[in-house]
Image (cartoon, rainbow, N blue to C red):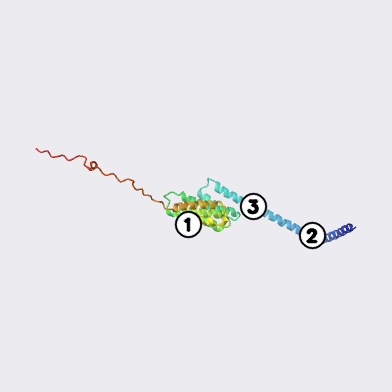
Amino acid sequence: MKAKRRHELQHNVLGTELSKLGAFLKKYGTYVAWAVLIVALIALIINYSMGRKRTAQRDVLAQYQAATQNPELTFEQRVEKLQGLAQQETNPFVAAQATVTLGDDFAGRLITLPPTTPPDERRKIHTQAESYYRQALDSFSDNVLIVGRARLGLARLAQTTGDFPTARKELQAIVDDPRLTGTPAVAVAKDDLKQLDALAKPVAMQVQLPTTAPAATSAAATAPATAPARATLP
């Protein structure tokens, strides 16, 4: 009996609530419909914008891959394309990659210069390589992989010019940065530091003394090859 009574009460409450909802929709149904329509339109616009953004990011990534994998491009053409990709804001990942790749390209160019290259030209290319590495560190400091690559690039660039203290500083910064723990850059930096330590060790000069005294000079060896002729008396 009590269960039946509870069921009736629940049924009555439900009926009352449905009646209130019906009255509300009858009075404000138009506004509710417009609100639902507006929310759906906003969701559609957001979804469309995100889709366009993802498409644009994929296009930029494809441009980067084309610029770095096309062997027919000259050095100047490759640099021009990478500079544009480094300055775009559609795909920050590609911008970071393009920036540090420019540093690598100019550093590689410096190594392959012929010996007859004027010093001013060498300094110019060195400055360009260093500036791109620094730009990568300043603009993409939250990207640990880019930080590792840029510092390795600076270290190798310093070694190329014989600036071993700067090279050691950059390598040690990689090892000491907790954000880079477990990344490939740390393993490479440790190996390079070992090589620098080996170069810094003085080379021991070992002078080997003769174990036996030099043999005495024989009289025969010191005597003239032929004795002087004796004068013949008449």
Query: In front of the other: label 1 or label 2?
Result: 1
Element under disc 1: helix
Q: Residues within 10 Å of mark 3 (few under 14, many from 20)?
A: some
For this view, does 100 lie left or right of residue 161? Answer: right
Q: Is residue 125 visible?
A: no
Q: Which residue is mark 2?
A: 30
User: Could you tell me residue 93's position as x and y percent?
Assistant: 59, 53
Describe residue 209's horizontal placement relative to residue 28 as left or right. left
Q: Residue at x 47, y 57 (%)?
A: 166
Q: Position of residue 113 (x, y in %)?
A: 45, 49
- Residue lying farthest front? 212
Q: Mark 1 is on which residue type?
A: Thr
Q: Position of residue 22 (x, y in %)?
A: 83, 59
Image quadrant where one finds the C terminus:
top left
At label 2, which amino acid type do we have?
Answer: Thr
**Residue position for label 3:** 54
Mark 1 and mark 2 lie on one chain; the one further toward the N terminus is 2
